Amino acid sequence: MSHVLLSFAGAAADAEPIVEALRAISSAPIHVRDEIVRGLDFADAGTAERVTGALRRVAIELVVAEDDVPALVATVEASRRRLPVRWMTLPVREMGRLA
């Protein structure tokens, strides 16, 4: 079975509803990281973010079986969030645990 790193990027205020929705259907560890995004794509930006050019976002990542991605994305889509969420997958070639 192949695994992928599934990443969601959304508004910091939407982190908890997204994480809770993912926890309800997945036992994979969920990593949450605050980020500042600089750029010219302001489609998801609030008014203050457009003025400063800095978007405060949260990155939510988990390693899952590739077959589970559609259900996880649908769960985030249905979650009680306020703003758009972007997502992507990256293949995981190897992984393990070092003790």
Image (cartoon, rainbow, N blue to C red):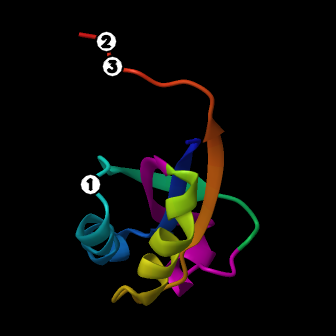
Compared to 44, does 68 lie above or below?
above
Q: Position of residue 94 (x, y in %)?
A: 55, 24
Measure the alpha-carbon separation of dots 3 and 1.
17 Å
Q: Dot 1: within a 10 Å radius of its alpha carbon, few (fewer than 14), some, or many (20 or more) residues?
A: few
Q: Position of residue 17 (x, y in %)?
A: 28, 77
Please give the residue where the numbered disc 2 appears in the rendered image: 98
- The magenta stretch is 42-64
Measure the alpha-carbon separation of dots 3 and 2.
4 Å
Q: Position of residue 43 (x, y in %)?
A: 69, 81
Q: Locate the C terminus by quadrant.
A: top left
Disc number at residue 1? none
Q: Is residue 38 left or right of residue 14?
A: right
For the residue pair 11 and 27, the one nearer the viewer reads as: 27
58 within the magenta span: yes
Compared to 2, does 86 lie above or below?
below
Q: Specify which label sits upstream in the sequence, 1 or 2.
A: 1
Q: Secondary structure at mark 2?
A: loop
| Residue occupying image coordinates x 42% and y 49% | 62
Please give the residue where the numbered disc 1 appears in the rendered image: 27
Q: Dot 3: within a 10 Å radius of its alpha carbon, few (fewer than 14), some, or many (20 or more) residues?
A: few
Q: Amino acid at mark 1?
A: Ser
Residues at discs 3 and 2 in contact (Cβ within 8 Å): yes
| Residue occupying image coordinates x 30% and y 69% | 25
For the residue pair 70 and 59, the one nearer the viewer reads as: 70
